[in-house]
Structure formats: C-alpha cells, structure tokens
Image (cartoon, coloured by chain):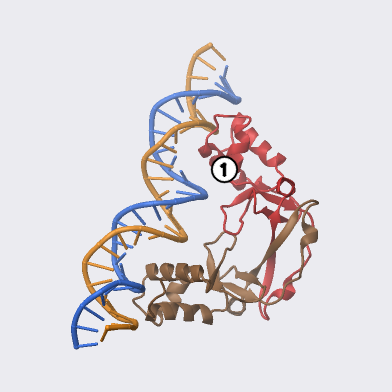
Chain colours: A red, B brown, C blue, D orange
Amino acid sequence: MLERKTRQRESILETFRQSAGPLTPNEVLEMTKQRIPDIGIATVYRNIKSFVESGLLLPVPVPGEPDRYEVAGKTHHHHFICRSCHKAFEMEGCPGSLTALAPEGFKVETHEIFLYGRCRDCVAKA
Amino acid sequence: MLERKTRQRESILETFRQSAGPLTPNEVLEMTKQRIPDIGIATVYRNIKSFVESGLLLPVPVPGEPDRYEVAGKTHHHHFICRSCHKAFEMEGCPGSLTALAPEGFKVETHEIFLYGRCRDCVAKA
DNA sequence: TCGTTATTGATATATCATTATCGTTACAAG
DNA sequence: CTTGTAACGATAATGATATATCAATAACGA
C-alpha cells in the first residue's frame, strides 16, 4: 500500500499537519472537503489506517468519543477537549510523573491527562 | 421505575459497592452472576440506566473502552487502568489544578487523569 | 392467598464506528 | 499515448455496544 501519490492522500496528511489537535475521521473528511469536495469517508478511513500502519499517524483515544489521530513523533503532551465545539486541542507541557497516585504495589507505565472546558473561540463567542 | 425491590437490582448495586473501581456492564454481569447465575445482560443495562437517571451511579468514560459506572458521591478522584487484566481501579488523591497546561484564552472547567500499567495482582502473576 | 403489574430473561432490533465490496477513475511505468 | 492496476467513491456488511419487545415471572398491597 501507499504505492501511488494521490490528491486525496496528500490532502489528508496536509489536514493533519495543519490541525491544532488530534482529529476524528469525520473531522478529517469535513476539513479535507474544502480542498477536494468529492472525497469520500472510505478514503479517509483507508488512508488513516495505512498512515497508522506506516507510523505516520498515531491513534489518540479520548474518553467517551471515537478515536482521534495525530501526526506521530511529537514530544510528550496532553489534550484539551472543548465542551462547546467538541474539538480536541494539543497542549504543551506535563506535570510530570504521577506515579504517587497509584495504590501500593501497582506498576505505573504511562499516563493520560484530559482538560475539559471552552476553547478560545468558544469563550469569545459566549 | 425503581418501584419494586428485586434480588437482581439489589445484587447489581451490591456489586458496585464492593468494587475497587468503575465497572463495565459486562463486568457487572459476570460479578453478579456469582450470586444470581441466571441474571441477564438486559437486566444489567436496564438497572444501570435507571440508577444513573436516579443519581445513584455515575458514568465513567475511559479512553478507547466502553463506558464504566461507579457509585455517585465519592470525593474527586482518578483511575488506574491495568493493561494486563483491563480492569479499572479507583485512586485517591489528585495533583490539583492543571489549568496552567491549557493554552492562553482557554477556560478550564475540569480534568481527568488516567494512569496505565499493571495492577497489584497482575504484577504478582508476572 | 390472590391479582395486578413492575420486572425479568431471551432475543430481536437499533446505533454508530469501521471495514469490505465492487464498479469506476486516474496514477505512472513503458 | 497506452495500459495495468492502485486507489477512489458509494454503499453494503460487519462488529461492538446498547435499547426495545414480549411472554413469563415474581413483588407486594389488598
């Protein structure tokens, strides 16, 4: 797979590169449609899957929502979920090890943090 | 709803009260079967739903997994997810406000933290 | 104890995200 | 250009979770 260069595939990657946070397949579809109006959802799923398999994208599971995806290789970070527009945003920084929270005898490997609230645009609109 | 006291309903609540963390409907089914072998999954879903509507239970969405539920009224806390047995455990404590992580102009309302690793039992088995 | 009816268990159906199918389109090697 | 076929778009099929249906059961007031 990924043997030919297509407008759709290029445009999907471009969508991810321009995004301020991880995207759901439907968000990718809507954003990419602005450049390729006839692109189909199957193409979005197909390419996301092959990008993940090739290591270009990473899945970002979010509580209570369908998986999102972001370009791989970023430094450790977490996400902000807007309760108004329901978009996810990448945040810089991390409070560091949270191992102390775990009960005695538990072995902590990683952690995930999600902040919830209103993004800048939605605060402005309120 | 919730007009009659039944063995099933009592036992489902008891399962939640005895649990070390939030449970999926299937986990509730398996645990409650130990006391009521013939209980059905529909009864579990039905009662969880009515307990949530009456405020006795709260949904606990977990990244990449079906919703779990826990008894309401607990103090602010977070959860540990075991990558081996896939159970969720309640943890005490919280690092406090994480507002600083959010980008300028974003309004933070709440946060969720998930630790991933191995629970005590699974560490022992390794 | 009896009778009403809420509740149950089994299972059909709904929902939603994702994948497979298939005929058509369009890369790109020759 | 021509041509083989990867990739596409539309949509049917799938899988997992959750809800609805319905005959049978059991809670509980009279």
In the rendered image, residue B42, in percent from the top left (x then y), is placed at 38, 67
Q: Nearer the viewer, residue A3 or D13?
A: D13
In the rendered image, residue B119, in percent from the top left (x then y), is placed at 61, 75
The residue under the point 62% across, 75% down is B90
Local secondary structure at mark 1: helix
- Does A45 sit above or below residue B53? above
In the rendered image, residue C26, in percent from the top left (x then y), is placed at 55, 23
Q: Nearer the viewer, residue C26 or A34?
A: A34
Query: Does A40 sit left or right of A81 as displayed?
Result: left
Identify the residue position indicated by label 1 in the image: A26
Near mark 1 (Cα within 10 A), the count class, few <14, some 14-19 or many ≥20, is some
In the rendered image, residue B24, in percent from the top left (x then y), is placed at 50, 68
The residue under the point 57% across, 79% down is B20
Query: Does A15 sit left or right of D15 as displayed?
Result: right
Hey, which quadrant is residue A125 in on the image? top right
The residue under the point 41% across, 81% down is B34
Query: Does D13 sit left or right of A68 as displayed?
Result: left
Amino acid found under the numbered disc labelled 1? Asn
